[in-house]
Image (cartoon, helix red, strand yellow):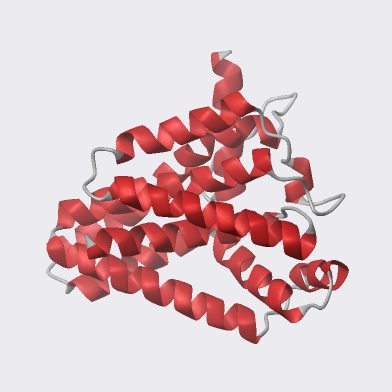
Amino acid sequence: MIRARFAQAQLALMLLTRLPAGRLPEPAPSIAAATWAFPLAGLAVGGVAGLVLLAALTLGLPPALAAGLALAAQIIVTGALHEDGLADLADGFWGGRDAARRLEIMRDSRIGSYGTLALVVSVGLRWQALAVLAGQGPMLAVAAVLTVAMTSRAVPAVLLAMMPPARADGMGHLASGGAGGAVIAAILLAGVPALAVPGMVPAMAVQALLAFALARLSLARIGGQTGDVLGAAQQLAEVAALLVLAAA
């Protein structure tokens, strides 16, 4: 059992980050089984970003520059995986006339005006919110980075269990049908530590509302979820939580 859980956590790290995670044992676990560990991958991402933020602030860099470096580190560690999903979703949902065309656009590697604007807004809001938190105190900012990285990655785990895949292939199809126990574990793994951070309770409530709204929109636009929908869900959840914390 312990070996299986370790392999699932290893798979989550391989899927959601570019960090070295070794080789999976045979037989490899399913993506659905590994969804409980998505917050652990978030912890790794947040840990790297938090260290960069703390180091930059300790060296005397202004909060805005420290926040920018932390955000850059986060993007590098994930390979901009979630940002790519957000851009593809924006292009597809608002650039296609029907579900088939929207899915086609989302699979296109080129980025359009909607996707570009979505990235600009997302990165800009995250940068500014994190700069505000860094100005309020280094430890508060680091705690926010860690907990938001975890809670925002629990959102895709929930959507995978709740929504049907919109395609017959792709990550959304391979990872669909996550077990309820794995989803509950992901929520608890991310949510319980977040309770210790001031402002995270309302932040998580906003994340839940956004996840519900995105699920409804995705069902209406393309009939379910895809890997791009999951990536966009993580980005929206991260933006929302950082904004709530910055306003607290």
Instruction: Tell me where residue 9 sits by quadrant.
Output: top right
Q: Where is residue 235 in the image (x, y as percent from the top left)?
A: 50, 61
Q: Quadrant of the N terminus?
A: top right
Residue under the point 24% across and 44% down = 197
Residue 39 coordinates in the image, percent (x, y) = 47, 40
Residue furthest to the bottom: 113
Q: Is residue 21 left or right of residue 169?
A: left
Asked if residue 44 shows in the view, the reply is no
Q: Is residue 10 above or below residue 101?
A: above
Q: Residue at x 53, y 34 (%)?
A: 37
The residue closer to the viewer here, 11 or 226, is 226
Up the image or down, 197 lies above or below 116; here it is above
Total marks in image: 0
Q: In this view, does 20 lie to the left or right of 195?
A: right
Split into 4 quadrants, where in the image is the C terminus?
bottom left
Q: Tell me, yes or no, if residue 114 can be seen here.
A: yes
Q: Residue 169: where, in percent of width, then height?
A: 84, 50
Q: Residue at x 22, y 69 (%)?
A: 132
Question: How far from the left and from the top, in percent, is residue 123?
Answer: 43, 73
Q: Quadrant location of residue 141?
A: bottom left
Along the viewing direction, whichever of 68 and 25 lies nearer the viewer: 68
> Quick check: 57 left or right of 215?
left
- Determine the image quadrant of residue 221: bottom right
Horizontal arrangement in the rendering, residue 246 relative to residue 26 (left or right): left
The residue under the point 83% across, 53% down is: 167
